[in-house]
Image (cartoon, helix red, strand yellow):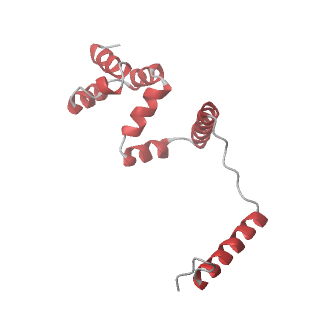
Amino acid sequence: MSRLACLLSASLLLGASAAYAQPERERAEIWRQLTPEQREQLWRSLTPEQKGEIWRRLPPEQRQAIRERLTPEQREALRHRWLEERERRRDQDGIEAPRRLTPEERQRLREQIREANRDWRKGPRGPHDRR
């Protein structure tokens, strides 16, 4: 790997704060001088957390341009990886997956909301009625 590639990889591997301590123009210039093979090698050496950090820092237009260049198989693999990662994080945090309501449950919830709205429009009742 060239000196420039080593500089970029070292700054990225040190973490986001070190990577972004370099001036933006310098990082962009280093990246432009890398061959596609060097970029791929560098990307593969990053941890998932580092890749995620870099991805989040990309402008939405750039992310969309990258997504558009993916084949349907690559998109599906990316989606699958993301879903697996989300599931793993949810398991680690002890969070249960949200459950969708059945059509009957949704209908019952709508009825309860309508009933509550009717009661609310009628006003307060009981010993604390201030009318």
Relative height, residue 118 to residue 84 (above, below)? below
Relative height, residue 124 to residue 65 (above, below)? below
Location of residue 120 by image quarter: bottom right
Location of residue 78 by image quarter: top right
- Comparing 25 with 35, the one in front is 25
Horizontal and vertical percent for residue 38?
Answer: 39, 20
Q: Residue at position x 75%, y 69% from top?
A: 108
Location of residue 37 by image quarter: top left
Horizontally, is 92 left or right of 7 in the view? right
Relative height, residue 124 to residue 28 (above, below)? below
Q: How many marks?
A: 0
Horizontal and vertical percent for residue 83?
Answer: 61, 39
Horizontal and vertical percent for residue 28?
Answer: 27, 31
Q: Residue at position x 32%, y 15% from top?
A: 6
Instruction: Work out which residue is located at the far front of the displayed protein and give it.
Output: 127
- Comparing 6 with 33, the one in front is 6
Horizontal and vertical percent for residue 29?
Answer: 24, 28
- Comparing 69 with 80, the one in front is 80
- Comparing 51 with 66, the one in front is 51
* Viewport quadrant of the N terminus: top left
Q: Residue at position x 72%, y 59% from top?
A: 101
